Image: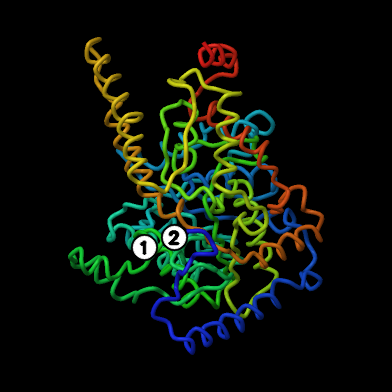
Amino acid sequence: MCRKDNKYGEEGITKASTRACHYIYTYLYIYSLVAIGDTNNVLAGSIQDFYADSKILVTGATGFIGKALIEKLLRSCTQVSTIFMLIRPKKGLNSQIRHDKLLDSSIFDTIRDQNPELLKKLVTVEGDVAQENLGLSEADRKKLVEEIDVVFHSAATVRFTEKLKDAIELNTLGTIKVIELCREMKNLKAFVHVSTAYSNAEKYEVLETVYPAPCDLEQLKACCRDPIDKKKEKKLVGKHPNNYTMTKAVSEYVVSTQASDLPVAIVRPSIVTGAWKEPVPGWVDNVSGISGIMVEISRGTLRSIICDEKCVMDVIPVDIVVNTLIAAAWHTARHRSITVPVYNCTSGTLNPISWYNYGRLTEKYCLQVPSKYVQWYPGFSFTTNRFRHSIIELFMHFLPALFIDLIMVLNGMKPIMFEIAKKFKKACKNGEFFALHEWKFQCDNLVALNKAISAENDKDTFSVDIAKIEWDSYVRNYLMGLRKFVLKDDPETLAGARKKLHR
């Protein structure tokens, strides 16, 4: 439901307790504004000056945000000393092989072309936030403790369907281990925790403050030791839509209670999407969330989506998120706050666009920049009518998939389309909560941060001015990015794809 109908957090709360909570949050928020809003008291020094000769640790380095963060630091803070990346072995690949694969990513194309020597500043440290002691060797831990100046904690499982035990170990207990490491560091200037704007998804209005944990930390730890039944698990998750948002909420509370004496900040991005400007407009390397939906719309294989098209679609380009992280660390090092500063890195308040308008822009540019992989003429609708959606899904999603599979079998090929359709249905189902509701995110701290950046003449390099995003051109570039970086569809095929679409 959209804002006017949203009743999150009001059930069962008395007027007195609501008023008390309001006073507490207002009190904390005023302190936050005092610490962040007065840009005249920020110590002199640009963001680039701050990062010169610094040694940085990034967890979650191989993730979408992580690799974009690393690329931006290398390209825009060229005097940085070293960026240590915590990378775990995965699927039979050790951390060094994963390091090499990371450097092959398209996001580093600009650096490879202009200044490849910068890539030598990336150093992999084998570790895993789910393991005891972060899976670090004694020598590596000692090195990090002795040398690190800035920590960006981005490692997390973002899967909405993650098992509760795994979500707790990665998102919550992993954060505790990173805090313990930060506490030992001798030169720590800033620790930035990457959360999500939906860590408080059960609320309608989300302030830039840390809310009480939705459940007890010891209860979560107990879940990792002893299996619990579905009933107890549901009770723990409470009003949260999934394990991801609940464990991220607890993680924020852990940061605010266990790391408040450290130079720490929390950044909450909303739905992270392709790049607005950097390293190139439209850069993206995955089909998660909105990216996957846009790909299937462009191919003509997605015809109906459960969504309230009147609601604000809160998306945030990955380069805006990265600039916020980099600037938040810089600002935190210079401005110790009484409370842990929180930045809601969201677009819905400062530059809103509805699901309907975003969808129509997507449809418009799918026709202008089609992929050679287009199967049907693009066209889709948002609906909240589940019966209507089910009918369209059956006749326009599943039956065509079965037909294509039949042709594949007759040609001696393995059928895959029906399974893909089922997986996509599941993915859309998992995201329905966020497509049917709307939130009002306070962004005062983010606006103040943008003013602080501008005061140091860093606004052109590290802008977080969301209001300047022009959604029409953004969606076009995003689709071009999906075409180039995800579908690996060369620009030379565009003319042929247009012919195929209109024949």
Q: Nearer the viewer, residue 454 or 382?
A: 382
Q: Quadrant of residue 93?
A: top left
**Visible in this render: residue 78?**
no
Q: Amino acid at mark 1?
A: Asn
- Numbered disc 2: secondary structure: helix
Proximity of marks 2 and 1: CB atoms separated by less than 8 Å: yes
Residue at the spot of label 1: 133
Residue at the spot of label 2: 141
Q: Quadrant of residue 101?
A: top left
10 Å crowding of disc 1: few (<14), some (14-19), many (20+): some
**Visible in this render: residue 384?**
yes
Q: Nearer the viewer, residue 268 or 296?
A: 296
* Left/right of residue 451 with respect to residue 84 in the rendered view: right
Where's residue 1, x and y in %?
47, 59
Where's residue 286, x and y in %?
47, 37
Where's residue 177, x and y in %?
40, 66
Q: Residue lying farthest bottom?
A: 16
What residue is drawn where x is 56% and y is 53%? 312
